[in-house]
Image: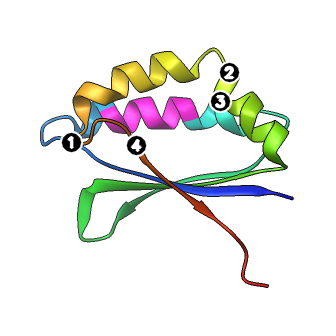
Amino acid sequence: MKKTLLAEFTVLPGSEERVAELVRDYAVRVREEPGNVVFEVYTKELDHLAYWIFEVYADEAAFQAHLAAPYGPPFNATLQPLIQEKESLLTFLSPLG
């Protein structure tokens, strides 16, 4: 079964350009993962500091491989001081049957 989630965070004012650069670079790497199906980055139309990242992985194993990727921890460590939250809020989603 596919693993689907929404990651959310809010950029600190003044960090917009750096976060956009970080997320764009990270997205390229995640999309190259063999188990990644979707990695789409959005900002709220009326609040470009609010990021929503919609992620779909082929299955739980693909998601675990994503978490184990060596570029994930450096990305998160660099992102953390640039966002309001301690870390991205993850919401796991299930399809409506």
Which amino acid, by three-letter code, is at mark 1? Gln
> Tag 4: residue type?
Ser
| Image disc number at residue 88 | 4
- Around disc 2, counting alpha carbons within 10 Å, would you say few (fewer than 14), some (14 to 19), or many (20 or more)? few
Image location of residue 12, percent across then percent down: 17, 41
Amino acid carrying label 2: it is: Ala
Identify the residue shown where x is 79% and y is 85%: 97
Q: Position of residue 37 (x, y in %)?
A: 78, 51
User: Quarter-wise, where is residue 19 in the image?
Assistant: top left
Judge whether 4 appears above or below 78 on screen. below
The residue under label 3 is which amino acid type? Leu
Circle 2: element type: loop
Q: CA distance from mark 3 to mark 2?
A: 6 Å
Q: Left or right: where does residue 39 sit relative to residue 76?
A: right
User: Magenta residues, as a range?
Assistant: 19-26
Quarter-wise, where is residue 32 in the image?
A: top right
First along the sequence among labels 1 and 3? 3
Total of numbered circles in the picture? Answer: 4
Task: Work out how far the residue at label 1 is from the one at label 3, CA to CA, in angstroms.
Answer: 22 Å
Q: Which residue is mark 3?
A: 67
Gap in angstroms between the C-alphas marked 1 and 2: 24 Å
Real-space Cα distance between discs 4 and 2?
17 Å
Contact between marks 3 and 2 (CB within 8 A): the answer is yes
Instruction: Find numbered disc 1 in the image and state the secondary structure of the residue it sits on.
Output: loop
Closer to us: 71 or 60: 60
From mark 1 to mark 4, how far is it between C-alphas? 9 Å
